[in-house]
Amino acid sequence: ERRSTVVFSELRERTGALDIVPPGFDCPVCCQPSAWQTKVVIARHPLARLVSYFGMAWVGNPRRGNFSSWSRFPTWLMHVTGASLVPDVARAFGPTDKYHTR
C-alpha cells in the first residue's frame, strides 16, 4: 500500500534513513514545476534543544557558578522558560545564552 506522504522502502523504515530531495530548480525538467512537492519544516523538539545547550555551554563550565552541574538544570530551565526568574541564573546569563535559548 502506498502512503500518501513519502514512500519508504522497508529497509529505510527500519534504519531511519531519509532521502534528501534537492530544490526543484536543481532537478530535471520534469520536477521544475514542483506542483507535486510538499513543503516541509524540520525542527528539533524545544526541550531537546535546551537540554543540549545546557549540557554544552553550562555543565562543567566554572564561569557558570552553581549552575555548572546537571542537578541545577530544572532551576535553569524554569528561568529560561520564564516560569520563574532566578537571579543567580540571570547573573550568569549572557547575550549568547539569550540567542541560543530564545
Image (cartoon, rainbow, N blue to C red):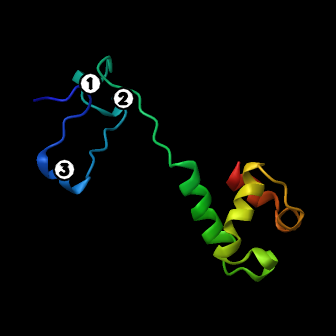
User: Residue flagged by tag 2: what amino acid is it?
Assistant: Phe
Crowding near the residue tagged with mark 1, few <14, some 14–19, many ≥20 C-alpha atoms within 10 Å: some
The quadrant holding residue 50 is bottom right
In the rendered image, residue 28, in percent from the top left (x then y), is placed at 24, 29
Label 1: element kind: helix
Left or right: where 14 falls relative to 76? left
The residue carrying mark 3 is 12
Q: CA distance from mark 3 to mark 1?
A: 23 Å
Circle nearer the N terminus (1, 2) = 2
In the rendered image, residue 59, in percent from the top left (x then y), is placed at 66, 76
Badge 1 vs badge 2, beta-carbon distance below 8 Å: no
The residue carrying mark 1 is 31
For residue 5, above or below residue 63: above
Crowding near the residue tagged with mark 3, few <14, some 14–19, many ≥20 C-alpha atoms within 10 Å: few
Q: In front here: 93 or 75?
A: 75
The quadrant holding residue 55 is bottom right
Left or right: where 33 falls relative to 81? left
Q: In front here: 82 or 49?
A: 82
Q: Write the residue at 81% across / 78% down.
A: 65
For residue 12, above or below residue 86: above
Q: Write the residue at 34% across / 38% down.
A: 22
The residue carrying mark 2 is 25
Circle nearer the N terminus (3, 1) = 3
Q: Write the residue at 25% across / 52% down.
A: 17
Q: Quadrant of the N terminus?
A: top left
Q: Write the residue at 77% across / 49% down.
A: 83
In the rendered image, residue 96, in percent from the top left (x then y), is placed at 75, 60
Q: CA distance from mark 1 to mark 2?
A: 8 Å
Report the number of discs. Answer: 3
Left or right: where 30 falls relative to 99? left
